[in-house]
Image (cartoon, rainbow, N blue to C red):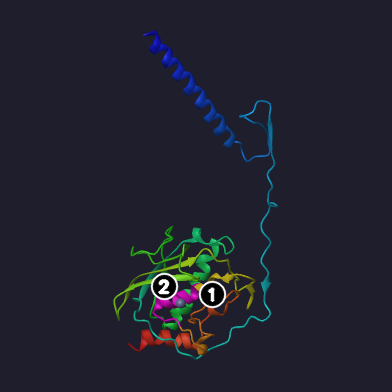
Amino acid sequence: MRKVLVFLTLIGISLSFFAGAVNAKNNQNEIPEVDGVYNDPGHSGLKIRVIVHRAKPGPPPEPTLQCDSITDPGSTAVVTPAGWKLPPTWTYNLNPTSVPSSVGGQYLADFAASGFSEWRSATGNKVSFVQGSDTTITRQAYDNQNIVAWGRVSSQNALAVTYIRYYQGGEAVDVDTIMNKKYAWSWADQSQHDLCAYEDTYDAQNILTHELGHWVGLNDHYTSEYTENTMYGYGSKMEIKKDTLTQGDITGASNIYNNN
Ligand SMILES: [Zn+2]
């Protein structure tokens, strides 16, 4: 009996010694990332000074507004239909909280309405866009919400992806646009800064208005005669010309809603 007790005591002592060593190691890992002087829990009397190097506080420098050399030429190259149309009333749902702070979520409703208004006119007022309740969704889904949100886009070099669920040759039933949050975005309000854009960034209204052209049923075009069209397939930094439509974009939309 006594031998067993001694044995158990020895095990207890060695276990507590081991636990103490592990504990000291854990404590060393728990030195806070905060300026100060700390006792090294593993070495009695040893001090640890922690110095944190910080970025200068305050907002990052304002991106520069460029107005020279920014133009908005016309184009008569007619954009082709992609195979669907919207019903006469189409409700959209915005996700303002997903908008990058460099754009400002409070402006999303304004510039989205401008984009929808351009396309409404282009259809000859055959489609009315109605702003529905805001959403917090950031992914495409067949969920009876037609969303505009910033979110994860994994497709390479994709500024935005629009998903259209539709019946071939018929009407769309669910449309979502996801803007790629990994890119640098800005928004130059053309009512304040006519033909100006922020350097080194993609203009949110410019890219969104292009995406809304897919909502109404238009294709992308990549050939040189379409470079000035809103439905030109590539987006560029410091581009605002797609805020408005060219005659070729308007004729394309009109053909979908007025010739069929
Ligand atoms: Zn496109």
Residue at screen point 49% across, 60% down? 98
- 10 Å crowding of disc 1: few (<14), some (14-19), many (20+): many
| Horizontal side of residue 172 vs 247, given as left or right | left
Quadrant assignment, res 193:
bottom right
Quadrant assignment, res 66:
bottom right
Assess whether residue 41 is covered by the magenta stretch: no
Q: Quadrant of the N terminus?
A: top left
Residue at screen point 39% across, 8% down? 2
Amino acid beneath label 2: Phe
x%, y% of residue 223?
A: 49, 87
Mark 2 vs ligand 1: CB under 8 Å? no
Amino acid beneath label 1: Asn
Q: Which mark is residue 206?
A: 1
Q: Secondary structure at mark 1?
A: helix
Residue at screen point 36% across, 76% down? 86
| Horizontal side of residue 39 vs 14, given as left or right | right
Q: Is residue 58 above or below residue 217?
A: above
**Which residue extends farthest top?**
2
| Horizontal side of residue 31 vs 138, given as left or right | right
In this picture, which residue range is highlighted in magenta? Answer: 208-220
Kindly identify which residue carries mark 2: 129
Q: Main secondary structure of the magenta part?
A: helix
Q: Quadrant of the C terminus?
A: bottom left
Q: CA distance from mark 1 to mark 2?
A: 18 Å
Front residue of 186/221: it is 221
Q: Which mark is residue 139?
A: none
x%, y% of residue 62?
A: 67, 64
Q: Earlier in the sequence, mark 1 or mark 2?
A: 2
